[in-house]
Amino acid sequence: MIDWNVALKLFMLSIAGTFLVMGALTAIITLISKFIARYQREKKS
Amino acid sequence: MISNFISQIGFINLTPGEGLMLLIGGTFMFLAIKKEFEPFLLLPIGFGIILTNLPLAGLMEEDGILGIIFKYGVEWEIFPLLIFMGVGALTDFGPLIANPKTFIIGAGAQMGIPIVMLIALLCGFSLNESSSIGLIGTADGPIIIYAASKLAPEIIGVIGVVGYSYMALIPLIQPPIIRLMTTREERGMVMKQLRPVSRVEKIFFPIVTSVIIILFVPKAAAIISMLMIGNLFREAGVVQRLAGSASNEILNVSTIFLGLTVGATMNAEVFLRPRTLLIFFLGLVCFAFCTVTGIMTAKVLNIFCKEKVNPLLGSAGVSAVPMAARVSQLMGQRANKKNFLLMHAMGPNVSGVVGSSIIMGIFITILVH
């Protein structure tokens, strides 16, 4: 007997969770890159 | 005594099913040697299939050599993780760091996984088996096997072989789907050259990514930490010997034993069932869906972003590295000779590896207690 309740929760959580974590990574890596670029520019000047 | 000796001869005990499996093993080896389809894995898998289907040899029994290697290497989840460390040491995350929004494309290309999980459920598989079948769409051998060993160890052999077979067939599976989903004009879109990425960024990347992912999805810790430690060895630049060992000796030794033992799980009794054919079919559906959702994500991203991406980056989000990226490059160049997409496509391609680890972690978190 399939527990559709669990299956549908798994379906939605896996989609939402993957986008959430990857979205967070996008934001954090972008911020770090900008910070490093700025730091290196200032160091040069 | 003589009759006892004769009864112990393999030829006498060979069943038609085992004979068929010997042919299948031979076919895998032929594909590996002659056609060079994923030879590093299909060759040991093919030989493993042959070995396990030789009657009375008992290589996969508890005290058989392959049985022992399987127990401590695969059931204890060591080989897939070591392979992932080697993959990390070989991966350049530069294109992903240069264009971080391709993280989103990598996530989108994993969306075929939950869809196929539901389809597999409707086909009569249990929830754990369905999840394991869905995860074939990660197109990442170690993840497929690691997840199967956690979720559905009884079908690990079939799942592994299906995954690796379709990964080898990416150049045949993706182009018709891409043509269906994109126009020639879209495929020919030229993208701005990626900015150079500094060494500091490359060193920060594995550390930050590991911490963030493990904080969100602790069950992905084993696989993501191995991937990122390998990558840190590579990018740190001060431990070239370790990076070399991870990407050569450790990767090669683990690949040999993983391939051999996964192949050896495929005895006739397990493999020659209608549901095996169904898993093969669902694996294909999975790759197709992941390609479709990847392309759709790239198109949706273009609605919101100022700087447009070529939708072919979406199909590269299916993380078969680097084949999916090569397919994008090839199709982009066919549409426009001045279009060089390979480096752009490597971004979503390696992001797909990260996305695969995350979605696998989510599945394990919910299903394994």
Image (spheres, rainbow, N blue to C red):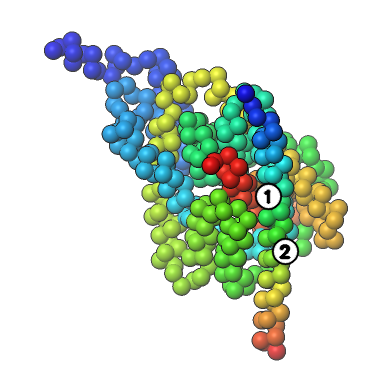
Seen from the viewer's position, the closer of residues B269 and A14 is A14
Report the residue that reaches farthest toward the top: B3
* Observer able to see residue B164: no
Q: Is residue B199 left or right of residue B337?
A: left
Residue B195 in percent (x, y) is at 70, 68
Confirm or deny contact between disc 2 and disc 1 (CB under 8 A): no
Residue A19 vertical placement versus B234 (above, below): above
Closest to the observer, B278 or B307:
B278
Residue B48 in the image, given as x and y percentages of width and height: 39, 33
Kind of residue indicated by mark 1: Thr
- Residue at position x 75%, y 45% in the image: B295
- Pick whichever, B26 or B138, lies toward us: B138
Could you tell me how far apart the alpha carbons at marks 2 and 1 are, in whole angstroms?
Answer: 14 Å
Name the residue rendered at 42%, 64% in the picture.
Answer: B242
The residue positioned farthest toward the bottom in the image shown? A45
In the displayed orientation, state which residue is furthest to the left.
B1
Residue beneath disc 2:
A27
Marked residue nearer the N-terminal end (2 or 1): 1
Letter of the chain that mark 1 sits on in the rendering: A
Crowdedness of circle 1 by 10 Å Cα count: few (<14), some, many (20+)? Answer: many
Mark carried by residue A18 = 1
Left or right: residue B19 versus residue B237 is left
In the rendered view, tell whether residue B161 sits above or below residue B141. above
Asked whether the viewer can see residue B219, the reply is yes
What residue type is disc 2 on? Ala
| Mark 2 burial class by Cα count in 10 Å: few <14, some 14-19, many 20+ | some
Residue pictured at 28% horizontal, 19% vertical: B10
At horizontal 49% and vertical 56% (from top left) the residue drawn is B226
- Helix, strand or loop at disc 1? helix
Residue B124, percent from left and from top? 62, 23
- The chain holding disc 2 is A
